[in-house]
Image: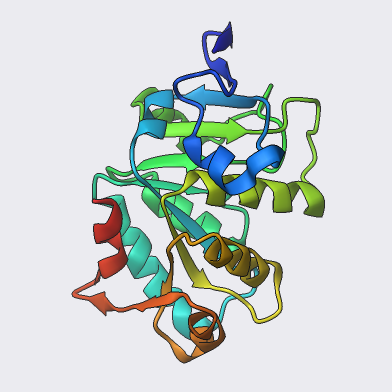
């Protein structure tokens, strides 16, 4: 592990904090280096990835908010790109609670300006930024987002896809994850019947506590 400044570290495959899941999930496509900013000890904990398609059905939105509220008050670690509208809403809620959060932007984090609501969690050791883009890629693109989502899925122990639009990129990623034998959970709702039919496990909300949260408790 090479430390480039007090706030940034570069994780290479020989680093003890380099996620094992990258080798298992990505094989020869695993990044040769990852930029990290924040508490890298978070990588030693079980993680739950959170994905939601860009366009989310209105009747699922309240359930997704309930999941985020439940997770934020548990000592769990949530990882994601937090790029789509509902993912961003979940991130705002998670940063206000106890949960640790790993954010993976679809760009380099070298020189990345932190939003104000990220700074306190970073100082408290609850936040980690990761990026496999170690060169000057400062504008997210569709290709970078796909690579970023694969990174998130590879690192996570369990995957929660609250909604995947049929035929969309999130659904394609879920199919890829399922083919690798990694657990994928989704809301047990008619809108997710295609994803459940592909092999995802439907979960229910009970007293506003998503059962999937127990997988990383």
Q: Residue at x 42, y 41 (%)?
A: 101
90 is higher (above) or lower (below) than 81: below
Residue 118 screen position, x and y as percent = 48, 35
Q: Residue at x 39, y 67 (%)?
A: 65
How are the colours assigned in the image?
Answer: rainbow
150 is higher (above) or lower (below) than 202: above
Residue 63 horizontal side relative to residue 215, left or right: right
The answer to whether residue 39 of the structure is visible from this angle is no
Residue 41 screen position, x and y as percent = 37, 25
182 is higher (above) or lower (below) than 109: below
Residue 50 horizontal side relative to residue 2, left or right: left
Residue 10 horizontal side relative to residue 197, left or right: right
87 is higher (above) or lower (below) than 134: below
Q: Residue at x 54, y 13 (%)?
A: 1
Mark count: 0
Q: Residue furthest bottom?
A: 190
The answer to whether residue 132 of the structure is visible from this angle is yes
Residue 146 screen position, x and y as percent = 72, 53
Residue 213 screen position, x and y as percent = 29, 60
């Amino acid at each position: 592990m090479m430390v480039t400044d007090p706030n940034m570290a570069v994780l290479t495959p020989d680093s003890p904090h380099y996620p094992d899941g990258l080798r298992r999930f990505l094989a020869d496509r695993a990044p040769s280096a990852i930029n990290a900013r924040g508490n890298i000890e978070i990588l030693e904990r079980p993680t739950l990835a959170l994905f939601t398609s860009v366009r989310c059905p209105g009747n699922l939105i309240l359930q997704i908010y309930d999941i985020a509220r439940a997770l934020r008050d548990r000592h769990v670690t949530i990882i994601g790109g937090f790029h789509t509208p509902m993912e961003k809403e979940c991130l705002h809620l998670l940063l206000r609670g106890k949960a640790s959060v790993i954010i993976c932007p679809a760009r380099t984090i070298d020189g990345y300006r932190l939003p104000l609501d990220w700074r306190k969690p970073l100082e408290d050791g609850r936040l980690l930024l990761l990026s496999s883009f170690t060169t000057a890629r400062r504008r997210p693109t569709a290709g970078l987002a796909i690579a970023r989502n694969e990174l998130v899925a590879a690192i996570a122990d369990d995957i929660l896809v609250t909604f995947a639009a049929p035929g969309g990129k999130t659904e394609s990623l879920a199919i890829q994850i399922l083919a690798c034998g990694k657990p994928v959970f989704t809301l047990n709702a008619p809108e997710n019947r295609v994803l459940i039919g592909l092999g995802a496990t439907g979960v229910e909300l009970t007293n506003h506590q998503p059962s999937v949260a127990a997988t990383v408790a």
